[in-house]
Amino acid sequence: MRAKLESIHPVLMSRDVSASVRFYTRLGFSMTFQDRPIDPQYAGVLRDGVELLLQWQAESQWAYPTDRPTYRIRVQEVDALYAELRDSGVLDGVGQSPWQTPGDTPWGTREFHVLDPDRNGLQFYRLL
């Protein structure tokens, strides 16, 4: 019998965990924990069963600032999520992607992309 994988909880690098938590709160996530009340180094955020972990990294870990990971998050209503985030103002000033607004892709999805303050990529998508 094979062991079943249940979920994945990506750890995103952060220069300032408190600032990252504030950004993800604006995306509709709620903080689930942080390792200490002042100047946290590790925290978790959750929205609709999707949990992301935010962990402080030393300056030496940022040697290649353009080589940041990207996380694909499957959602039911791409356009509704985009409208929610746009209307809240959280998307102001983020982007630098051809998929800053929802669009149908050649690979069979509808999606839009966001960069967090530390340039971790978030791609919200649904299958067409």
Image (tube, rainbow, N blue to C red):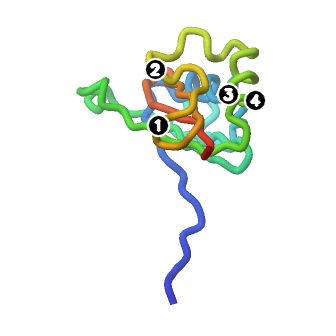
Q: CA distance from mark 4 to mark 3?
A: 13 Å
Secondary structure found at label 2: loop
Sequence-earlier tag: 3 or 1: 3
Residue at horizontal 62 percent and vertical 47 percent from the top: 51
The percent coordinates of residue 119 (x first, y second) are 43, 24
Compared to residue 123, the image places residue 19 above or below, namely: above
Give the side of residue 12 with respect to residue 89, left or right: left
Screen quadrant of the C terminus: top right
Sequence-earlier tag: 1 or 2: 2
Q: CA distance from mark 3 to mark 1?
A: 27 Å
Which of 15/48 is in front? Answer: 48
Residue at horizontal 59 percent and vertical 67 percent from the top: 6
| Circle number at residue 106 | 1
Three-letter residue code for mark 2: Pro
Residue at horizontal 44 percent and vertical 24 percent from the top: 118
Q: Nearer the viewer, mark 4 or mark 3?
A: 4
Compared to residue 112, the image places residue 33 above or below, namely: below
- Disc 4: CA contacts within 10 A as few (<14), some (14-19) or many (>=20): few
Which of 19/6 is in front? Answer: 6
Sequence-earlier tag: 4 or 3: 3
Q: Are marks 4 and 2 in contact (CB under 8 Å)?
A: no
Q: Are marks 1 and 2 in contact (CB under 8 Å)?
A: no
Q: CA distance from mark 4 to mark 1?
A: 21 Å
Give the side of residue 104 with respect to residue 75, left or right: left
Q: Which residue is mark 4?
A: 80
| Circle number at residue 27 | 3
Q: CA distance from mark 3 to mark 2?
A: 20 Å
Sequence-earlier tag: 3 or 2: 3
Q: Which residue is mark 2?
A: 98
- Disc 1: CA contacts within 10 A as few (<14), some (14-19) or many (>=20): few
Q: Are marks 3 and 1 in contact (CB under 8 Å)?
A: no
Name the residue furthest bottom: 1
